[in-house]
């Protein structure tokens, strides 16, 4: 009997000692299931640094310590952060950031941190935001061993809705990961919207006449919102006016109607304008009013007897030093033959030329305008006008806008 009691006592002491040792090894007292080990770092040969925690779990704040307890309680675990990841020799803190729910009224900002834990300096030679809505700046472009730098990213959500994920690519001198990416995601809520968003009739409208259209501005969170300003932008808004109309009490959910007028002076060809409406309203009951903006885009083709295959000579995006060629067909709506001469006015860059080629098909009365040019050392907009002279009454002198862009593939470099 005594032998059994000694064995039981020794067993209890051994169990207590095991618990003490385990508590020293894991001061949080958390089990492996409740406190998982950090996710493995991304492989150096994976060019994209992405967060391994794609579900974005909520970061619970650490509870305040109980100072009245004696002896003091075990220290609480620190707040959990999105794990840092390795991209080659660079360590990226929170490579995938979640802005959460945001309104589409103002830009949001986040500062990523890039650390160089290696024994060699790493330079960032190029920065490529994945969208024009994203701007990024670096605190410096060369990261010394052991140094940390900031990547300041601003995202403008205006004009977007729903889940959006964007990124910024960094080109580095690290051979293990020449391209490093940071990304962010957000759920964008629309504060005000236009219905419809586009005024774009399927059929051309006649020049020399007044044309009137209507769209509605809606603010779902505040039926009593107001319009504070209407402004115009776009390629040629000078022939476009807009005004607020009284609300219809019988259709209050439709919002505030806005009347758009295209005046009779709008010329033959394409007309593009953007109507920006600034609104003021509450994002929720009892909340302070905020200011937002919504837009309605106008895109019209104004033709009479003569029609064009495109209401603009769209060159598109051209690389520096490259040449381009663009065809636009001019034909008669009634199939009648006519004469046509073409020239370029105010063209940039210089050296653009146009050739008038009659359409060979006997069933079509018209011409191909072949516009050619070269960017050379020019960077920026391609522009000008194609001036056309015809013998068609009322359309003796008409014009088409030339539009394009010379852009280097590098978005940004130090």
Image (cartoon, rainbow, N blue to C red):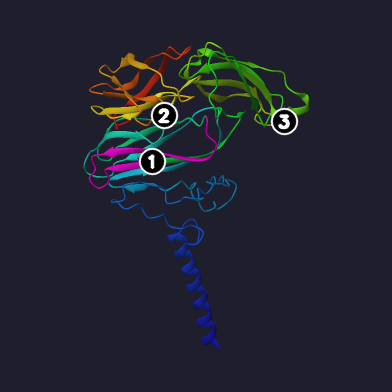
- Badge 3 crowding class, 10 Å Cα cut-off, few under 14, some 14 to 19, many 20 or more, is some
Q: Which mark is residue 364?
A: 2
Judging depth in this view, the residue of 215 and 288 nearest the camera is 215
How far apart in space, not on screen, are marks 3 and 1 (Cα)?
A: 41 Å
Range of residues picked out in magenta: 159-181
Secondary structure beneath label 1: strand
Return the residue at label 3.
Answer: 253
322 to the left or right of 16: left
Secondary structure beneath label 2: loop
Residue 271 sits inside the magenta stretch: no
CB under 8 Å between discs 3 and 2: no
Dot 1 or dot 2, earlier in sequence:
1
- Badge 2 crowding class, 10 Å Cα cut-off, few under 14, some 14 to 19, many 20 or more, is some
Quadrant housing the C terminus: top left
Question: Residue drawn at (23%, 27%), measured in percent from left and top?
Answer: 321
Question: Residue drawn at (38%, 15%), measured in percent from left and top?
Answer: 388
Q: Percent x, y for residue 291?
A: 60, 23
Secondary structure beneath label 3: helix
* Mark in front: 1 vs 2: 2
143 to the left or right of 135: left
């Amino acid at each position: 009997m005594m032998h059994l009691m000694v064995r039981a006592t020794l067993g209890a002491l051994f169990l207590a000692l095991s618990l003490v040792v385990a508590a020293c090894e894991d001061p949080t007292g958390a089990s492996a299931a409740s406190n998982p080990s950090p996710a493995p770092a991304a492989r150096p040969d994976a060019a994209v640094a992405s967060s391994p925690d794609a579900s974005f779990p909520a970061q619970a704040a650490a509870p305040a310590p109980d100072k009245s307890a004696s002896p003091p309680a075990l220290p609480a675990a620190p707040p959990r952060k999105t794990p840092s990841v390795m991209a080659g020799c660079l360590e990226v803190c929170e490579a995938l950031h979640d802005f959460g729910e945001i309104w589409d009224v103002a830009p949001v900002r986040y500062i990523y941190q890039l650390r160089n834990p290696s024994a060699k300096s790493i330079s960032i030679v190029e920065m490529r935001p994945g969208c024009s809505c994203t701007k990024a700046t670096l605190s410096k472009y060369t990261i010394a061993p052991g140094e940390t730098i900031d990547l300041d990213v601003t995202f403008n959500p205006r004009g977007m809705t729903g889940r959006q994920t964007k990124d910024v690519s960094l080109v580095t001198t690290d051979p293990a990961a020449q391209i490093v990416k940071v990304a962010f995601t957000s759920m964008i809520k629309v504060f005000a919207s236009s219905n419809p968003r586009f005024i774009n009739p399927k059929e051309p409208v006649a020049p020399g006449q007044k044309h009137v259209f209507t769209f509605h501005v809606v603010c779902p969170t505040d039926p009593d919102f107001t319009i504070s300003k209407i402004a115009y932008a776009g390629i040629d808004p000078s022939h476009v006016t807009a005004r607020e109309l009284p609300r219809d009490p019988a259709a209050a959910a439709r919002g505030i109607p806005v009347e758009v007028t295209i005046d009779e002076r709008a010329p033959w060809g394409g007309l593009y304008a953007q109507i920006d409406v600034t609104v003021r309203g509450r994002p929720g009951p009892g909340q302070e009013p905020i200011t937002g903006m919504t837009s309605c885009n106008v895109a019209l083709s104004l033709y009479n007897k003569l029609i064009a295959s495109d209401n603009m000579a769209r060159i598109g995006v051209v690389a520096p030093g490259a040449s381009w060629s663009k065809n636009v067909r001019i034909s008669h709506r009634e199939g009648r033959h006519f004469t046509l001469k073409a020239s370029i006015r105010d063209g940039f860059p210089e050296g653009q030329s146009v050739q008038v080629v009659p359409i060979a098909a006997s069933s079509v009365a018209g011409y191909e305008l072949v516009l050619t040019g070269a960017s050379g050392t020019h960077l920026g907009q391609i522009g000008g006008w194609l001036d056309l002279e015809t013998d068609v009454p009322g359309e003796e002198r008409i014009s088409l806008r030339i539009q394009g862009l010379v852009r280097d593939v590098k978005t940004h470099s130090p």
